[in-house]
Amino acid sequence: MKTLKDAKIGETVKVVKLNGQGAVKRRIMDMGITKHVEIYIRKVAPLGDPIEVTVRGYELSLRKADAEMIEVE
């Protein structure tokens, strides 16, 4: 399955599933990343970490480790 980490700059993807356990999953959900929400990939830092995205109308930076837990289509 494709994860948010694999998405390209300028692409809009839809969240299919959140992996992870307990507090980590809760923190991702608290940032507004839930099932069926669309995420636009704005920028990726030169070394690939962090990834800047737009979700629910605001900008958010995610670590690569967190982006790997988000399955998208």
Image (tube, grey):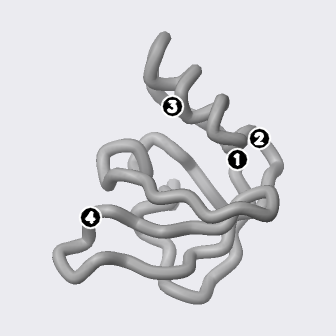
Find disc 4 in the rendering and name its residue: 49
Measured as percent of width and height from the top left, residue 6 is found at: 42, 69
Measured as percent of width and height from the top left, residue 59 is found at: 62, 64
Q: Disc 3 residue type?
A: Asn
Of circles 1 and 2, which is in front?
2
Among numbered discs 1 and 4, the one appearing first in the sequence: 1
Q: Disc 2 residue type?
A: Lys
Q: Is residue 34 left or right of residue 70?
A: right
Q: Disc 4 residue type?
A: Asp
Alpha carbon distance from label 3 to label 2? 11 Å
Find disc 2 in the rendering and name its residue: 35
Marks 1 & 2, CB-CB < 8 Å contact: yes
Q: Is residue 43 left or right of residue 49?
A: right
Q: Residues within 10 Å of mark 1 (few under 14, many from 20)?
A: some
Measured as percent of width and height from the top left, residue 63 is found at: 34, 51
Find disc 1 in the rendering and name its residue: 16
Q: Residues within 10 Å of mark 2 (few under 14, many from 20)?
A: some
Q: Disc 1 residue type?
A: Val
Alpha carbon distance from label 1 to label 2? 6 Å
Among numbered discs 3 and 4, the one appearing first in the sequence: 3
Among numbered discs 3 and 2, the one appearing first in the sequence: 3
SS for callout 1: strand
Of circles 4 and 2, which is in front?
4
Q: Is residue 21 left or right of residue 49?
A: right
SS for callout 4: loop
Among numbered discs 1 and 2, the one appearing first in the sequence: 1
